[in-house]
Image (cartoon, rainbow, N blue to C red):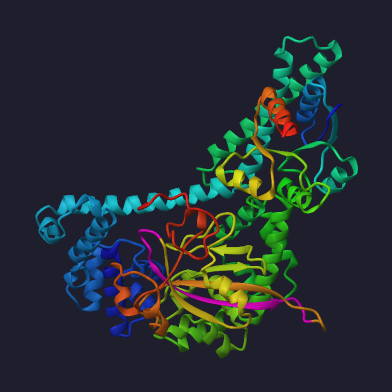
């Protein structure tokens, strides 16, 4: 069965590239590009996995993730956090917010696919 | 450092003992009162003919003003030895060393002072790199471009078949992102190149405002005696200054100048200085609460007025010894710094939050309660300061509406003019070489901001310091 991933990211060319490689890998891809209503969009679209950028217009990815973990429907939803900051403190923040996996920009396409496959296999 | 302090302090003490005004002594030796004020506050070196002239007018031998230089040199050497205790410098032989190898000793003391100055610069630069919003935004832009380029390039080099329209699209994206990356990188390099120049492009509206205020010495003579609506004067001041580039900075400057004018109307410089003259020789001459009560204004107004007095005008008009420029920091109820008038030796964070141990923030939790505290800023050259802080409501009162508070903290260097505070001796400070410490006891240790603060065991720490032990 095709797995559905929601990419929440505000850079259009990053969205396009990730969407392309995931679609080619057999994923059904949905996208969203702002933080304001990201929680509502996740709840509405009910994806199997979320790729979530940290620096989004309107709201931080950490805040969105914290809210998702507070909702029964998304408490266990696999969420891959993407961030431009890879310091230990950022990793701690992601873990504290409930990230399933943490990836620092820039990343390779193979790393993204590998991380997603590992998350859905769990 | 100590040598100059001692010499300046001796000149000042001798002048006061002779009941001479700064302006009178300055005239007799052929210098301006403001220059004498700088000498007395150890901001200018003195020697040669001027030293001879001053000692003649003051009726003392030149050596009476300068003897102690050796003691000061030894104190600086002691400070250097203490800062690098692992080197095992022979403390007992210090005086012998300074006497036998005076040139080497002075060189060592100079290098020590230079290291302290450079450390302060590094702290400020680290603070800037950490919190500068322009650098943070630029780095995000660069990393976003690189991420898009890497992902797109990965698709294009993949040996799997790709439809021509998709290939064209990714080529376009690649070109767009490469162009964006080049532009972002160039802008960032230009910005970093420019940070070393005094006239460099500024990063934030508050920087522009502070450069504008600094160029005027925080004093606007044109608004001091302006009783009419000052709009025209304010427009002219803003239009004439190239530092104010952004609309936000110009709006902030207007707001600052409007408040300045309102303060000047409420408390004219002449009245303030007359009150200071009445309090000559006592701390009250620099105590914003005492002055506010004497003059019928609020303490925050007195602090703002003291912080924007013209140093030259003050030196010329005041018969009393003066403390020189005073520092001022203001923040809103969120703790965001609104105004930073720097003072030598007390570092202020360029961006981001300040040290939570500052009395400025204690004042926010105790609105309308004036706070007076002796401070020492953490770091190897931690000088001592007296801080006065208060939080007062801003805006008009309204029924059933919670007031918004704004806090001010005025900072002056600790000097014999300031009386010791009872609480000083129960503080957590550590002894140091500062001569005023003998008078004032320990002080409350404060920092600049957590990121560059060496005090590891601090209950107020928000994040780890980037400073290594012993930095």
Residue B309 visible in rendering: no
Residue B60 position in % (x across, y down): 19, 76
Q: Quadrant of the N terminus of chain A?
A: top right
In the image, residue B380 lies in the stretch drawn in magenta:
yes
| Quarter of the image where one finds residue B155 | top right
Position of A19 relative to A78 (above/below):
above
- Residue drawn at x 65%, y 45% as measured from the top left: A94
Residue A14 position in % (x across, y down): 75, 29
Magenta stretch in the rendered image: B379-397
Q: For this view, does A4 lie left or right of residue B462? A: right
Q: For this view, does B398 lie left or right of residue B148? A: right
| Quarter of the image where one finds residue B385 | bottom left
Q: For this view, does B55 lie left or right of residue B224? A: left
Q: Nearer the viewer, residue A100 or B343?
A: A100
Residue B74 position in % (x across, y down): 20, 62
Q: Quadrant of the C terminus of chain A?
A: top right
Residue B303 position in % (x across, y down): 56, 76
Q: Nearer the viewer, residue B6 or B21?
A: B6
- Residue drawn at x 40%, y 81% as measured from the top left: B320
Residue B239 visible in rendering: yes
- Residue drawn at x 65%, y 33% as measured from the top left: A105
Position of B317 relative to B209 (above/below):
below
- Residue drawn at x 24%, y 55% as measured from the top left: B85
């Amino acid at each position: 069965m095709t797995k559905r991933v929601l990419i929440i990211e505000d850079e259009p060319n990053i969205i396009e590239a990730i969407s392309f490689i995931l679609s080619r890998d057999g994923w059904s891809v949905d996208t969203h590009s702002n933080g304001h209503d990201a929680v509502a969009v996740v709840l509405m679209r009910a994806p199997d996995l979320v790729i979530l950028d940290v620096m989004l217009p309107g709201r931080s990815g950490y805040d969105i993730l914290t809210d998702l973990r507070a909702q029964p429907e998304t408490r266990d939803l696999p969420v891959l956090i993407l961030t431009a900051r890879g310091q230990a403190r950022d990793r701690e923040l992601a873990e504290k917010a409930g990230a399933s996996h943490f990836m620092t920009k820039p990343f390779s396409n193979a790393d993204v696919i590998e991380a997603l496959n590992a998350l859905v296999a769990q | 450092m100590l040598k100059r302090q001692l010499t300046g302090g001796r000149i000042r003490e001798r002048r006061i003992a002779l009941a001479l005004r700064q302006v009178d002594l300055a005239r007799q030796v052929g210098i301006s009162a403001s220059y004498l004020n700088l000498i007395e506050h150890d901001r200018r070196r003195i020697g040669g003919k001027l030293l001879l002239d001053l000692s003649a007018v003051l009726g003392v031998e030149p050596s009476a003003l300068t003897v102690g230089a050796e003691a000061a040199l030894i104190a600086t050497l002691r400070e250097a030895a203490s800062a690098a205790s692992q080197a095992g410098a022979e403390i007992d032989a210090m005086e012998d060393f300074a006497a036998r190898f005076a040139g080497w000793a002075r060189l060592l003391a100079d290098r020590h002072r230079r290291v302290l100055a450079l450390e302060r610069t590094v702290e400020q630069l680290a603070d800037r790199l950490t919190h500068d919003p322009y650098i943070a935004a630029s780095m995000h832009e660069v990393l976003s471009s690189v991420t898009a380029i890497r992902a797109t390039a990965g698709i294009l080099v993949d040996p799997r078949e790709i439809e021509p329209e998709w290939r064209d699209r990714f080529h376009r994206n690649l070109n767009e992102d490469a162009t964006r990356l080049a532009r972002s990188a160039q802008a960032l390099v230009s910005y970093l190149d420019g940070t070393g120049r005094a006239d460099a492009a500024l990063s934030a509206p508050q920087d522009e405002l502070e450069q504008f205020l600094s160029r005027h010495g925080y004093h606007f003579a044109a608004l001091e005696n302006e009783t009419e609506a000052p709009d025209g004067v304010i427009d002219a001041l803003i239009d004439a200054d190239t530092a104010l580039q952004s609309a936000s900075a110009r709006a902030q400057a207007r707001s600052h100048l409007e408040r300045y004018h309102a303060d000047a109307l409420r408390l004219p410089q002449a009245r303030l200085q007359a009150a200071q003259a009445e309090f000559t020789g006592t701390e009250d001459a620099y105590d914003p609460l005492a002055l506010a009560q004497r003059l019928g204004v609020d303490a925050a107004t007195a602090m703002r007025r003291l912080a924007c007095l013209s140093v030259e005008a003050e030196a010329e008009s005041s018969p009393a010894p003066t403390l020189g420029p005073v520092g001022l920091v203001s923040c809103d109820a969120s703790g965001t710094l609104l105004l930073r008038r720097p003072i030598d030796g007390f570092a202020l964070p360029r961006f981001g939050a300040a040290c939570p141990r500052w009395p400025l923030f204690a004042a926010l939790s105790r609105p309308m309660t004036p706070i007076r505290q002796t401070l020492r800023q953490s770091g190897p050259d931690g000088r001592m300061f007296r801080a006065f802080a208060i939080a007062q409501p801003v805006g008009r009162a309204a029924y059933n509406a919670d007031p918004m508070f704004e806090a001010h903290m005025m900072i002056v260097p600790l000097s014999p003019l300031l009386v010791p505070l009872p609480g000083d001796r129960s503080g957590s400070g550590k002894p140091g070489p500062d001569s005023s410490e003998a008078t004032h006891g320990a002080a409350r240790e404060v920092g600049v901001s957590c990121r560059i603060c060496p005090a590891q065991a601090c209950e107020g720490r928000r994040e780890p310091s980037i400073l290594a032990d012993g930095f």
